[in-house]
Image (spheres, helix red, strand yellow):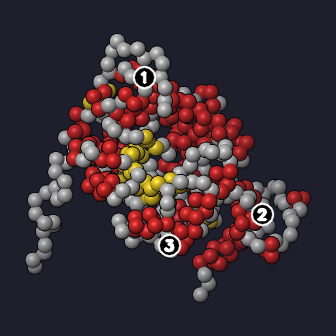
Amino acid sequence: MVSLKRRVARKVIFQYAGKDATQTYNEVHTISLLPRTLTTSKLVGKLDPSTIDAAQPPTQRPTAQESDQSKPPLTSVISPHDFEAIARGTLSKKAWAFYSSAATDLIADKANKSFYDRVWFRPRILLDVRDISINSSYPIEEVVSAATVGYPFFFQLYVNKHRPSSESLLKRVWDLGIRTLFLTVDAPVPGKREADERVRIDGTLSTPMSGTTAINDKAGSSLARTMGTYIDPSLSWKDLVWIRNFWKGKVVVKGIQAAEDAKKAADEGVDGIVLRTVSNHGGRNLDTSPPVLLTLLELRRHFPEVFGQVEVYVDGGIRRGTDILKALCLGATAVSIGRTFLYALSYGESGVEHLIDMLRDELETAMRLVGITDLSQAHPGLVNTGDIDHLVPSTLGRLYAGDGPPKAKI
């Protein structure tokens, strides 16, 4: 039986036979992967550019120059939402589907964002607020080397079914000087992201950090579904012992969706937790999972002591500086923003910097208008959560009477 990798390789070779595949390769890979993954025996020879048929472009994708010309100037981008609208029109169909897709009916995705709109500020007045202070498709080695010396990094780990592979990866991460590990626990299996599955990919895509490859099949070409095949679905609380024995740095458990699990993680001695609506950025795995703000309020109601035990991060649905301030007022140590930065990358580094400037300006403005000059002054009294408080469970464990669904008797 021909192996999957061999069949994939054959398909790619035939698809690009006689054509220049450089552009397709460079869209998802770095050139440094070639000597890292292939031996010199695989080098057939050097390509003579004059032999390439310029009349037949290898792909139908717009060139980088054409894509840049279709985008408005960066100076005209005045809102984080603008980046999303521009990305929709300039990214490839597959890239847009992967970045923007969420699970099934998008209920959790929409709620995760809309709940921030249902929390109201309670501004204070006559306060001096003049001066504010605000406290991979690529190998990890290449990412770290691109930053300035001493730049703070953390590494997000999806535990491999083959544990030695995860241990080897963590050794590479430690040797690079990274000392904080974010252990992802809320994606034991990939969810159903229909928009991602409907758009087929050209050939194959692979991720060097996981060693997995996405290909077209009868179920479509969901990058999330295919790339997640290496993740260990048997990961459990007892594996924190394995992590602690192998990793001597700080550990943050990422993917908490219930107050009970937040409490258990704190009692297990982790250094931080990340509350989020199931992996990645807004309900992308399990639709109708709880909006992250609801989990944050649930934790405040039932286990407020956790905020003093561990750092609490919030991930999901944040699109504005006001969203950031609301999360911090409710006890979050910090927030994570994913999708909006992906959209900003359509402008490269300058786009990311522009987005950071916008979010900083929005956050500073919101701080002044609610009457604080430092993020340490944020507190729950500055927000009104009455519109969603009634959605927080009053009791935990079994929320309804009975031991579960009725059992069949016939």
Q: Quadrant of the C terminus?
A: bottom left
Q: Position of residue 226 (x, y in %)?
A: 51, 66
Amino acid type at mark 2: Lys
Left/right placement of residue 195 relative to residue 7 reads left
Left/right placement of residue 139 relative to residue 32 reads left
Task: Please tell me which of labels 3 and 2 falls first in the chain.
Answer: 2
* Residue found 40% across the figure and 60% down from its top: 185
* Residue found 58% across the figure and 56% down from its top: 136
Amino acid type at mark 1: Thr
Q: Are marks 1 and 3 in contact (CB under 8 Å)?
A: no
Q: CA distance from mark 1 to mark 3?
A: 47 Å
Which label lies toward us, 1 or 2? 1
Q: Position of residue 280 (x, y in %)?
A: 45, 53
Task: Please tell me which of labels 1 and 3 falls first in the chain.
Answer: 3
Task: Determine crowd level at label 2: few under 14, some 14-19, many 20+ residues with C-alpha closer than 10 A.
Answer: some
In this view of the protein, which residue sits in the foreground, 8 or 119?
Answer: 119
Q: Position of residue 225 (x, y in %)?
A: 48, 64
Q: Is residue 320 above or below residue 401?
A: above
What SS does tag 1 mark?
Answer: loop
Q: Which residue is mark 3?
A: 163
* Residue found 50% across the figure and 72% down from its top: 163
What SS does tag 3 mark?
Answer: helix
The label number, if any, that marks residue 229 in the structure image: none
* Residue found 59% across the figure and 38% down from its top: 352
Q: Which residue is mark 2?
A: 19
Q: Which residue is mark 1?
A: 373
Task: Please tell me which of labels 1 and 2 falls first in the chain.
Answer: 2
In this view of the protein, which residue sits in the foreground, 53 or 32?
Answer: 32
Q: Tell me if residue 132 can be seen.
A: yes
